[in-house]
Amino acid sequence: MLLTCRKGVRLPIVAAIATLSLSLLGVPTQAAAAAPPDIPLANLKAHLAQFQAIANANGGTRAHGRPGYLASANYVRDRLNAAGFTTTLQTFTYNGATGYNVIADWPGGNPDDILMIGAHLDSVTAGPGINDNGSGSAAILEAALEVSRQALQPAKHLRFAWWGAEELGLRGSRFYVNNLPAAERTRIKGYLNFDMVGSPNAGYFVYDGDDSDGTGAGPGPAGSAALEQTIIDYFTSIGVPTRGTDFDGRSDYGPFIAVGIPAGGTFTGAEGIKTSAQAALWGGTAGQAFDPCYHRSCDTTANINDTALDRNADAIAHAVWTIATAAPPVVVWQDTFETATGWTVNPSGTDTATAGQWERGDPEATTSSGAKQLGTTVSGTNDLVTGRPAGSSAGTYDIDGGVTSIQSPPITLPSSGPLNLSLSWYLAHGSNSSSADYLRVRVIGTTTATVLNQTGAATNRNGAWTTATANLNAFAGQTVRILIDAADASGASLVEAGIDDIKIAR
């Protein structure tokens, strides 16, 4: 069965402020960023007119395996080549037809710190696909051309991508990600996806990187919250409210988040119906689809909301310029737990847990009414985990009998800041838990600061990686240790916890 693209929409829940400090990802405040350009609407519409002309000349479609798709790819590639990008026309095969991804690298920037910006270029066979997704393709193309016009010299390396065969199940982006060597994947620090940014009955949706909406698929990989907030900041600056949209895996961010790459982006709606509350928020027609021509032959240049297209293109430029030109933070200390760095289990000698003690290793997944111990890490193979093996059941190596703790080696902090700590964590428990169970992280110097204190509750909670941050300016110039402890203090409750990718940066 072929998977056709349906973009999930979160309805009226306000996206909260991201929990991850932007500075830790090299994302400064707007005032500190290089000034983003105002993308001309006329340029965007000129690209859409070209996509329409290509479809008209090729049976009314730009779908995978059809000549209209290759013509679209060549149109994009020719303009990027002329603008000084290094381009690759990556080929793959699906359903017996050759597909193409256009990959374009802008010279310069840190090759170990890549920001990718992507959109799918193909349409469905039924129509020319001008909103879905000529709109996103045109918007990122014009952003790329503006990079060239300004001779931008970003701190990050910029890579743009136009994906093939998205409408058949994300085939192009999956091929790209799945064929990247592991070392190349780790160099991609963020992926921004733009799929349908000019819907005629538009909404203003931003991918919910921090899962502040609390519904659907959960948060994106660590760093997604900062990408989300950067985009929200732009819309806030022009007085346009936004709402969250779920990482439901139905667009090309899916393969990236599946391998732990942070993602973000915008979306103006597909076949979902705009509610009265949304019409009051954004205008348009309640009770009608965001895009009544979704996957139909009427998805032509007449099927575009110019205001939404213009605003989203400017949001793309804001995100690219803000993120890519930011000076990267200086890492003071970090631990990804891929090697032993001198952590001490039970440093005080007072631990009481009889099972599930903290250890560094490759975790084995367990389930009980959902995921409990996660078998995936935030990066690499290892993390800190309570009872690494799965055992014969989820309760075999979970925390039992009380408290387990682990302490870092000494960390000498510089005498000046700002100093910020970030880490990824999860606490999972069954419905037999209570507030007596917990996961806690403290920084200990001349004083002690609790940077994370998550308690249990009498409800089922599945494991999901989440990011926590804290300001450590009060510890500047000191030698500190990080102390992590977790407890099963509710009797026979099922409790699992994990920690990964701890970083202190300035």
Image (cartoon, rainbow, N blue to C red):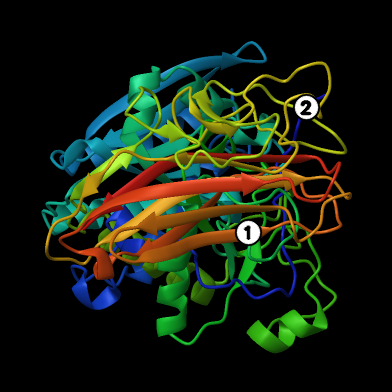
Instruction: Looking at the picture, tell me which residue is in the foreground, 145 or 177.
Output: 177
Q: Is residue 224 visible?
A: yes
Question: Looking at the picture, how far across and down is residue 260, in whole percent?
Answer: 50, 36
Q: Which mark is residue 2?
A: 2
Q: Which residue is mark 1?
A: 454
Instruction: Looking at the picture, tell me which residue is in the foreground, 53 or 219.
Output: 219
Report if the CB atoms under discs 2 and 1 are less than 8 Å apart: no
Q: Nearer the viewer, mark 2 or mark 1?
A: 1
| Quadrant in which the N terminus appears | top right
Q: Is residue 68 visible?
A: no
Kindly identify the residue that appears in the image at 47 percent across and 43 percent down.
Answer: 348
Q: Quadrant of residue 270?
A: bottom right
Q: Which mark is residue 47?
A: none
Answer with left or right where residue 474 lies relative to residue 434: left
Answer with left or right where residue 118 lies relative to residue 40: right
Work out whether 10 lies above or below 67. Answer: below
What kind of residue is marked 2?
Leu
Q: Quadrant of residue 291?
A: bottom right
Work out whether 452 lies above or below 75. Answer: below
Instruction: Looking at the picture, tell me which residue is in the foreground, 491 or 422.
Output: 491
